Image: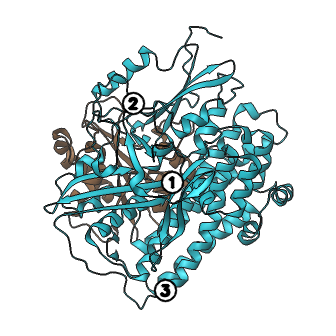
Amino acid sequence: MKVIRVLGMGNILNGDDGIGVHVLNELRRKCLPENIELIDIGSQVLDILSFCDGAEKIIIIDAARNGNKPGHIYHIGTNDLSHSSSFPMVLHNFKLSHILRTSKKIFGKDFLKRIVIIGVEVNNIEPKIGLSKRMVEVMSRLVVLILNEIKK
Amino acid sequence: MGQKRIVTINPLNRVEGDLEVKVEIKDGRVVDACSSGVAFRGFERLLLKRDPMDALVFTCRVCGICSISHSTASSIALRNAFNARMEPNAYFIRNVVLAAEILMNHLLHFYALFMIDFTNKKYSKRSDYKEIVKRFSFLRGTSYIRAMKARKDFLAFLGLFIGKWPNTLALQPGGITKAINTSEIARALAVLSDLRDFIENDLLGCEVESFLEINDVKVLNKWVNEHVEKDLGLFLSLAEETGLKNLGKGIGRFISCGGYELPDGTTWYKSGYYDDKLKPFQQEKIAEDIRFSYFEDYEGSRHPFAGSTEPNAEKKVAYSWIKAPRYNGKVVEVGPIARMVINKFPFVTALMNDSGINVYTRSLARVYEILVLLKRVEEWIKEIDPEKPFYIIHEKSKNAKGFGIIEAARGILGHWINIENNKIKSYQIITPTAWNMSPKDSDRRPGAAEQALIGTPIEDEKNPVEIGHVIRSFDPCLFCSVHVMKGKGIRGQKRIESRGERGKKPSVSLFRSSKSL
């Protein structure tokens, strides 16, 4: 069976940072086929790799800060990720682009073709439960986007 | 010397992190250091007035790397408050997964952070530089990639025991809510054996057991000469020649709260307070000072049961969002080296007697603990009996207090809960990084890492890799940027203003940098 994995990233204790996980919760309400796996991986950017084995396609949803208006949706191919050659001071500072570069070495060059990243420009990142109004507004668009990705 | 020019360098070429270390250099040495947490976290406040059991849902998300550690501390605090009991199986499984999280942390720290520093251009004249770069380059090094793969493959191990990683809810006050059967145990042992293969083939070049037999420095030196082609051997030969023993001198005072509870009521790691001599550890002697932290002032220092987390971004003297925990009023160091000194591991004691507490001993103790824990995990798995229960249902108290203090990867982690009328009245967390990276206290005594930084010789101010070595030897759990200042006090007006500005938006706390994607 062709497995498609949707990875929601972010910390739900940090307001909009948890958008990825909130989207997953929304998707859980849909009747998705069995081959779609929804996984809340919290802020463990580092461990995305562990969730890539055996998946035909991996859709990552994450909060983004890229200078656009809150609610702006990025539909990102892996080549667009900024490549930083600096390295992290501590473990928390791993960037998604770092992990994806490492993934090529582990899973092979073609691996990145299996990955889709959906980012959402976020508003408030602060210790708080729940999303800001703008995030709630874009939720349905995000869900449709992901469902389309799943169907592709 | 004495120039008014301020040199602000971020040697890591990155935007600011959650932790900022500023050092002032004079005549090629660090003369002052300020370690500042630059973001208000205050997750404790989210817990107020909630159901006590919610703590389990929230606290595992406090840290992305130490999810199980927070779950463990939180569930122990609740168990303590509710007088809950656990079955032996629960003790062993909790120990297995906590130890697994910690040893994976250490492995990652070694490969993905610590060793990368040696690819710095400062070392480019070394004859083995090419080899170092080949193995340890960030994102490219052959050993780096193998270590990342080992971590990737290992996480299935945690899934088998506690259902998922991160943010599991399987760790409860009454034990473990996921039972494990014989075939799952067999699979877990196979995953563990792959990890052992990586450690023996790539890190050590010998069996774990034979390395653990080394108990003195002469034997270690001989071992290094024979194993330079492996990763630990290369590190140790580098460490000797690059003077890591002279960097990051420790204050020599340690605490360990004891770690890994056993069914007989004891802990596998013993607790203690080490200050030349070993004394008993008492949690009542923990208190937090906030003189230089962005929190509403209170008189003196407070035990976490009496503590508060009221932010005050305008506080003029403050320079950190981290509080300054002290033990019996003293600055202490926590971490793998602390627990291994207190537990009198002959290997670590020999290292300490030989060169004291420094970047070298701190880092080697961390790697050593990988091996120690791997062996323990194998033993604890054998103790699990799938036929016996894993969980005991418990009562909940309407009004109660409880605490859970554990040894996490970076040192002691404490959770204190106060329940009133079935609701959380107060919840306080003290992380290991707060102990090691704390700011100064009311008596103006710098924190453990600040003290370790003072005196550090800096060869090239534009490339202060030495500071990286010192900070990394503590493995701080917040991401960190470094600023070097020359000729002007680091506690000058400018810095305080900039803190204040940031303070107006006190809650920006990015746990991961994926936002910059």
- Residue A144 drawn at (x, y percent): 23, 52
Chain under callout 3: B
Measure how far apart labels 3 and 1 are at the Cα level.
34 Å
Which quadrant does the N terminus of chain B fall into?
Answer: top right
Numbered disc in front, either 3 or 1: 1
Q: Residue at x 28, y 26 (%)?
A: B504
Numbered disc in front, either 2 or 3: 2
Which residue type does callout 2 highlight? Phe
Of the pair B349 and A11, the residue shown nearer to us? B349
Up-down relation of residue B349 to residue B502 (above or below)? below
> Are the residues flagged by discs 2 and 3 from a single subunit?
yes
In the displayed structure, does residue B246 sit left or right of residue A65? right
Name the residue beneath numbered marker 3.
B183
> Are the residues flagged by discs 3 and 1 from a single subunit?
yes
Of mark 1 and mark 2, the one earlier in the sequence is 2
Numbered disc in front, either 1 or 2: 2
Chain under callout 1: B
Name the residue beneath numbered marker 2.
B292
Task: State the brown chain.
Answer: A
Q: Residue at x 58, y 79 (%)?
A: B379
Mark 3: few, some, or many residues within 10 Å (few <14, many ≥20)?
Answer: few
Of mark 3 and mark 1, the one earlier in the sequence is 3
- Residue B505 drawn at (x, y percent): 28, 29
Up-down relation of residue B381 to residue B125 (above or below)? below
Name the residue beneath numbered marker 1.
B411
In the displayed structure, does residue A55 sit left or right of residue B174? right
Farthest-out residue, bottom: B387
